Image (tube, rainbow, N blue to C red):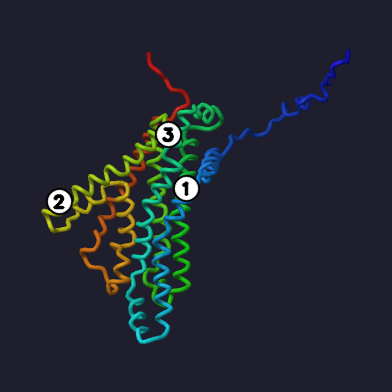
Amino acid sequence: MSEIPTQTPAQGPIADLTYRTYTGPLSPPVFRWWAIAKMTMRLAVKKKAFWGWGITSCWNYILMLGVLTLFEQRAGDGPESEMLKRFFENVQWNTLFLDGYLASLFMLFLCTLTIASGNIAADNKANALLVYLSKPATKSDYLLGKWTGFFLLLLGVCGVPMLLVYGYGLLSFRQYGFLTQDPWMLPKLLVLMSVAPALLSSVAVGISSQFNQPRIATAAFAGAYFLPMVVSYVMFAIIRSHDAGDSGALFSLYYAHLAGLEEGIAKSLLNTSGGFANLLFGGGRVRDTDAIGPPTAWIVWLSALGLIAACWFLAWRRVRAVEVIGS
């Protein structure tokens, strides 16, 4: 019978015990939330629907830039060159960014529905929180990591087209007042591109953390997005049909839902009601009845911050490693 080979202590996996004499500092691991964020993004970008909705979201920017480029080429010569040059001088460039941003909001919602709405619910279903929170990671690390992963992906979907359009306009339409019309345009766009991702990520984290089934969490997120919107628009239409005036309270009612907050903040930040298509085809101006005016800025900003805080509070109360069942 052949002898079974044995392993000497010198060859063992724990033969080196010099770590026992270490007397240096024992610093806690940092950026634990970033490891969770990276894993969240790594799994999300594998979903084809996310890429499809993300690419579709920039259709308005592409359309408007295509029309403007065609107009500029025709403005070089011909009998209508002077008319086209005057048109470019009257264009309000902030309306282009507002309309492109508003046109992307629904696709941004669909991106959130794809990658975020059921994410934490799936962790609850798989008891993954037992793994996350049994490691040197806190509840704050988990929630911040999930939120950051969603936010950065949505920020890319919202911000990359906006910055590309800004760069194109800076190179192509600077002679038409693109840069001088609003010197603070770029800082405003940097703030604007973060608004919808922050709101959608917070609401997704808050709602998804309440459920153990991803499908139910996704349905709840969709309901929280659409139901207040329908109620708000119906009440706005009824009240406005009886009162022709556009009061501040009426405007606040129009923006009293998630997409409305995103729209209201954008309009108050860029100081325009939108309607770039009317600028192109309506003589370079927007009629007063074409769009709903900007709301009171502090109301929509305070409402957005309150909604984010409420969603974080709900998630903080719900997320736990072990479900405690009372007797």
Identify the image quadrant of the N terminus: top right
Q: Which residue is mark 1?
A: 50
Mark 1: amino acid: Phe
Q: Are marks 3 and 2 in contact (CB under 8 Å)?
A: no
Seen from the viewer's position, the closer of residues 316 and 28 is: 316
Distance between the Cα atoms at labels 1 and 2?
Answer: 38 Å
Mark 3 lies on a secondary structure that is: helix
Mark 1 or mark 2, earlier in chain = 1
Q: Residue 147 location, x and y as percent?
A: 45, 42
Q: Residue 264 location, x and y as percent?
A: 30, 54
Distance between the Cα atoms at labels 3 and 2?
Answer: 38 Å
Q: Residue at x 44, y 51 (%)?
A: 53
Mark 3: amino acid: Pro
The numbered mark at residue 100 is none
Side (left or right) of 304 relative to 114: left
Mark 3 or mark 2, earlier in chain = 3
Mark 1 lies on a secondary structure that is: helix
Q: Residue 125 location, x and y as percent?
A: 46, 28
Q: Dot 2 surroundings within 10 Å: few (below 14), some, or many (20 or more)?
A: some
Q: Dot 1 surroundings within 10 Å: few (below 14), some, or many (20 or more)?
A: many
Seen from the viewer's position, the closer of residues 66 and 96 is: 66
The numbered mark at residue 239 is 2
Farthest-out residue, left: 242
Mark 2 lies on a secondary structure that is: helix
Q: How many marks?
A: 3
The numbered mark at residue 214 is 3
Mark 2: amino acid: Ile
Q: Dot 3 surroundings within 10 Å: few (below 14), some, or many (20 or more)?
A: many
Q: Residue at x 17, y 56 (%)?
A: 247
User: From the viewer's perspective, is the residue at label 1 or at label 2 nearer?
Assistant: 1
Distance between the Cα atoms at labels 3 and 1?
Answer: 17 Å
Q: Are marks 1 and 2 in contact (CB under 8 Å)?
A: no
